[in-house]
Amino acid sequence: MSSWNFSGNTLEFDSLTSCILYLRSLGLKIKRDTLSKYVKEEKMFHNFLGKYYEKTLLDNSVSAKLDSLIKEYKNSVELAAKEPVNKKNKALVVKSVSDNEIKTFDSIMDTVRYLYSQGIQLDRKTINKKIDSGKPYKGYIFQYKTEEGKE
């Protein structure tokens, strides 16, 4: 991973961490980020000059497989971080039984607010029960809006 030249001798390490452990055994303390910065900028550190190897330690097939696994892991982390869809954020379709009027709402709470403005007091729990049963309630039928925009 890196080599270090000290008084004409070349020391090779397979990682920055192993190099840090060696330096600590000599009584020198340095953080990994600082050591990396010294190597990149080709700065001396207590008479040590570090360089990264030009060659890759992994062959191409292992490196490609490792890249693929890293990408797969990142994708799984991104998917896990997305908010789950819950019922109160789903769009609802409300049909009036008396005049077949159809209204669409972005959420159950929007539906609750609309019905309240019409003089009907309902809560989310009751609407969910009516959606599950499919039975009308106070002249309205409630359904979740499907992805295609149909009820």
Image (cartoon, rainbow, N blue to C red):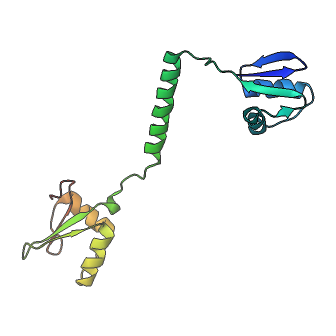
**Residue closest to the far right:** 27
**Residue closest to the far left:** 99
Q: Name the quadrant containing residue 2.
A: top right
Is residue 121 among what the camera can see? Answer: no
Image spot of residue 139 (x, y percent): 14, 74
Taking 89 as reference, is 67 above or below it? Answer: above
Answer left or right for 41 relative to 118.
right
Count of residue discs: 0
Residue under the point 47% across and 33% down: 71
Residue under the point 36% across and 56% down: 86
Answer left or right for 32 relative to 22.
left
Residue under the point 55% across and 15% down: 59
Image spot of residue 88 (x, y percent): 34, 62
Taking 18 as reference, is 93 above or below it? Answer: below
Query: Which residue is more in the foreground, 35 or 109?
Result: 35
Image spot of residue 44 (x, y percent): 85, 32
State which quarter of the image contains the N terminus. Answer: top right
Q: Name the quadrant containing residue 52.
A: top right
Query: Which residue is more in the foreground, 78 or 60?
Result: 60
Is residue 88 among what the camera can see? Answer: yes
Answer left or right for 57 relative to 31.
left
Query: Which residue is more in the foreground, 92 or 120?
Result: 92
State which quarter of the image contains the C terminus. Answer: bottom left
Query: Which residue is more in the foreground, 104 or 41?
Result: 41
Q: Name the quadrant containing residue 127.
A: bottom left
Image spot of residue 76 (x, y percent): 45, 38
Residue under the point 79% across and 37% down: 31
